[in-house]
Amino acid sequence: MAEVVLDPIPFLNGGGSIGDPAVWNARWVHAGGDAVHHTALVRAVRDASGHLTSLRGVLRNPSGDQAETQAALRASEERLRRALEAAQNGIMLVDRDGSLIFVNRALRRLLGYGREVPMHLNEVAAPERLDQLTGLVASRAWADVGGGLFETGLRHRDGSTIEAEIALAALREEDGTVVLIEVHDLTESRRASDAIRQMADYDRLTGLPSRDLFDRHVQRAILDARQTQACVAVILLDLDRFKLVNDTLGHASGDRLLKAVAERLHQYLPSPHIVARFGGDEFLVLAPQLPVPAAAEGVARRVLQALSEPFPHEGRLLKVAASAGVALFPQHAEDPEALIRIADGAIHLAKDDGGDCFRLGTGIDSASARDRLSLEADLREAVTQHAFEVYYQPQVDPMSNELCGMEALLRWRHPGRGSVPPSDFIPLLEETGLIVPVGEWVLEQSCQQMQTWITDGFRPVRMAVNLSPRQLMVPDLGRVVRGILDHTGLSPELLELELTETTASLTMDAVIEVLHELHAIGITTAIDDFGIGHSWLSRLRQFPVQTLKVDRSFISGIDQSPGDRAIVEAVVALGHVLGLTVVAEGVETERHIDLVRELGCDLAQGYYYSPAVSALAMADMMRLGTTYSQAA
């Protein structure tokens, strides 16, 4: 800009007039001869009489203003371009004929473009969605309400279709309207939605249908069966002693076994059967469109047969057994929940019969299942409240009738049910895992009681306490036992831990390691229920055990069955050859005791001498130095 002073005469001679002030647009000739249009803001200068003497003003250089404006415009456009390029979502600017004015980096990357850039909408729209996109851009019906949101398909450079959500906005320009389209890729969200549905409908570990999806299959099968007068079977399958696999081999091995079971069941039960995972080590089988109820038994047998062959597992064969409960529509119930509940009740009947079998449910088994659930809830409360008692059953020398030891046995007196048989609640403790804290409590109570008797002046005798397979696999079991002995003050030589025959289903190397650890403390160990299986025989010499307890089922028949007598005689001979003490359990009659003496059993235990009694009654027995039977 420059200040100028002008003679007004040339301007006035042209017939013009001067306002005060005024803007003049005129063609100016520079000294170099170039003619340029300038704008001047001028003001009249007058003398004292008011005559116009000159014009004074400011001359603007339009070329400089234009350069500044253009530079500012270019900077603004660059900032906008950078902002659009940096956007996380894809963005394109489309003019009214479908040409792409701008495509940002995110959209180019989404569509598989590098340096080459698509030029028209028909290059980026999926063929089946091109009419939709071009129609949206052309109609602009959404523009009056401030924008639109639509799902569409875009074409990747490789020809595949990308599902996308687009938002449209109108940008007004002098020569028409440019449409800004923001693109949000729906691939990940759709994949996430599919994954969520997969998680809800299918078990993550086995890939089998979940309980919810299974219920929907059952509902569909029931609807079909109503029309065809067919039957529908729901089979609940529970792996026997699977918890021992987890405890001994680890959860990773347990998971691999569950996957193998799922694959085996799926292989043996093709469509239209449905195999689902119920949870834990339980599976569900749906057998639809059965012509008669008896056909369900065939399916159940096929299920158990599927698991009869051993499973290859970490270089060895692992035997798996199962119990199954069968419920039928319409015979037992008419909805999935009730059918599963009845099948669950039938499973417990199968387990009570020794497992590895199936049982049919009845219409009243649901009440049995509810009663079992109620008992389990009460049992958990009893654990919390320490509502159990420890009773003691004497072990006696059959030759001298001398009290030589005793076995601690758990008892539960329910406030409403009265005395609950151990056969009813001990399996529940095992299944729920509560046997671990309860077993530890029994061990401490028994050790404390024996030490109290010793302090009171009674002769020390050995205290035998049962150790379940689950307890045997407790980490640092030796440390736990040693801590109880230290706390109670009982000498280790006065404690004997009894292992049941089912312990043989554990990994033998792990069992031997634990037994050696207990033996190092000074504790003796016994094998309970010996004779009902053969699992111990092959490894018996490797175990640091001191006692064999002959199962009561052989003692009860010893006076009538030559076979039972022969088994007891063999067990006694085997035990004595190995230097072990042999205890006869279940001695109830005079004849039993005579035969036990004849066969050479070292100790006898049973109702002939005394049932399990309270600590107070046992103290009386110890005071007399004999058993109830002998005292009478």
Image (cartoon, rainbow, N blue to C red):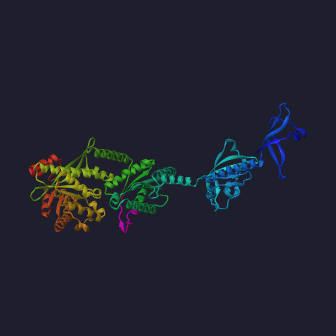
Furthest residue in direction front, as rendered: 48
The residue that appears at 17% across and 59% down in the rendered structure is 584
Furthest residue in direction top, as rendered: 49
Q: Is residue 545 magenta?
A: no
On the image, the x and y values in percent for residue 507 come to 31, 64
Left or right side of 110 for 371: left
Left or right side of 194 for 157: right
Residue 632 seen in the figure: no
On the image, the x and y values in percent for residue 565 come to 18, 63
On the image, the x and y values in percent for residue 440 come to 25, 52
Instruction: Please tell me in which quadrant of the rendered image residue 568 appears.
Output: bottom left
Q: Is residue 319 magenta?
A: yes
On the image, the x and y values in percent for residue 40 come to 80, 42
The residue that appears at 45% across and 52% down in the rendered structure is 211
The answer to which of 588 and 293 lies nearer the viewer is 588
Residue 184 to residue 52: above or below: below
Split into 4 quadrants, where in the image is the N terminus? top right
The answer to which of 235 and 48 lies nearer the viewer is 48
Residue 338 seen in the figure: yes
The residue that appears at 86% across and 33% down in the rendered structure is 51
Instruction: Please tell me in which quadrant of the rendered image residue 598 appears.
Output: bottom left
Span of residues in magenta: 304-322
The answer to which of 514 and 96 lies nearer the viewer is 96
Left or right side of 453 for 76: right
Residue 482 to residue 385: above or below: below
